[in-house]
Image (spheres, helix red, strand yellow):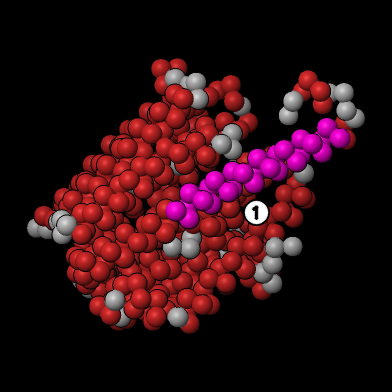
Amino acid sequence: MNQTWTRFLPAFIREKIAGREALQQGLDNTIWMMGDQVVRKLIGLLVGVLLARHFGPQLFGEYSYAIAVVMILSPLALLGLDDISIRRLAQDQTAKDELVGTSFLLMLAGGVVAFGLAMAAIFLARPEDRLVHWLVGILAAGTVVQAFIAIEFWFESQMQWQFTVYAKTSAFLLLSFVKIGLILLDAPLVAIAWAGLAETTLGSAGLLLVYRSRGFSVRAWRFSRRMAGSLLNDSWPLILSALLTMIYLRIDQVMLGNMIGDKELGNYSVAVQISEVWYFIPMVISSSVFPAFVAVEQDNEPLFYAHLQRLYGMMALYAYLVAIPVTIFSREIVQLLFSSAYAAAAPLAAVLVWAGIFTGLGAARNVLIIAKNWTRVNLVSIALGGVANILLNLLLIPQYGAMGAVIATIISYWFAVHGSCFLFKSLRKTGWMMTKALLFPKVW
């Protein structure tokens, strides 16, 4: 807001103008984030469909297995610093260079650790499978390169998502077309993995260019041991939470691949693509409103909870609007997109899509967790959900195959996000709020 003339206006008018500008900034930020994710999901779905149709359930299952292994360990590269650093940058812009520089070096070290653990894990799990070794090695190298997303923290804290969209989406689009070309040229699966690593590398280079174009310099970054200790002290529960979240999100694919086989995993992975392609909307909404929720929580707690109830209602309503038609038309969706070779994926998708209810509510609950800094309680609830998923998979996969993994996923998602709230006094209120949203989903 231009302070040179608005200072002559009455206070209540200045407040209204500032509020509208903040609202408009938040809306613009949401539009940029939504547009980015829509493009990514549509193009990503196209590439995924072409991959699945071209390579068939067996090879597509191996590729999905490699991705699952890397994703389970990827939180060690991010170190839970995204929400923590964004929150701190939103509260104190003067610490930008120290926060961004320290976050970058911490994530660089975390990426190296994640790469090493991924390679060790795959050699132990599948010592003779050379193709999967290569796939995991190439994909895991991206966890090292992605340390430059520390630059995103600054732009997101200032609600300037468009600059990261410029950088990363350009790389995504270019390399997506490269992947499509490789598929049409009948290139090996390893070439697709190399294109994925190139996308991460090019996206990081783009972030650097955008950062410099805004007048900032990487040379100004400073590493602070004090800051590193402070960040890790706040983020270690988030690291464990993210790690456990990835375990209960992806362990089903790893266990299916090891216990039943890659062909069954290929069908299950198609069901996952259909059910998860919608997840980006709750994530975008939660990320875009997070800075505003932090500000409201500090000044007006009743208003904070009123907005949170609306957010829960919005998430539940959206999930129902997606799950019902996908359940009804799952067979037609699979046939149209992936061909009859994946007919077994239709009943899996029809059930698995209902897990999206708890994914959306979990994204909204994460706003509360971070704003209140209740990361330790969140860690326990996620851990319980992860344990439940592993135990249910061990029990149900041998008897029901991929459908057993679907059932285990839905139960564990519900428990980690909703059911576990009633085990903790601090989360009991939000548990009842989610129950209300599930029974009476609405946004007003």
* The stretch drawn in magenta includes residue 38: yes
Residue at 54% of width from left, 46% of height from top? Answer: 32
Foreground pick, 79 / 50 = 50
Image quarter hosting the C terminus: bottom right
Residue name at image x 59 percent, y 55 percent: 364
Residue farthest right in this picture: 10
Density class for disc 1 (Cα within 10 Å; few <14, some 14-19, many ≥20) is few
Q: Which residue is drawn at 44% across and 24% down?
A: 212
Report the quarter where the N terminus lies.
top right
* Foreground pick, 243 / 140: 140
Q: Is residue 336 visible?
A: yes
Residue 375 image position (x, y, % from top left): 54, 46
Residue 77 figure quarter: top left
Name the side, left or right, on which 127 lies relative to 343: left
Secondary element at image label 1: helix
* Residue shown at 65% from the left, 40% from the top: 25
Q: Name the residue under label 1.
A: 426
Residue extending furthest toward the top: 220
Amino acid under label 1? Ser
Decide: is 155 above or below 308.
Answer: above
Can you say whether 92 is above or below 191 in the image? above
Q: Can residue 294 be seen in this view?
A: no
Dividing the picture into quarters, in which one does residue 340 lie?
bottom left
Report the residue that reaches farthest toward the left: 128
Residue 195 drawn at (x, y percent): 25, 47
Q: Position of residue 132 (x, y in %)?
A: 17, 56
Q: Give, as a single range, the part of the protein colored magenta.
A: 13-39
Q: Position of residue 14 (x, y in %)?
A: 83, 32
Q: Is residue 274 magenta?
A: no
Res 51 → quadrant? bottom left
Q: Name the main secondary structure of what is drawn in magenta.
A: helix
Of 141 and 376, which appears nearest the observer?
A: 141
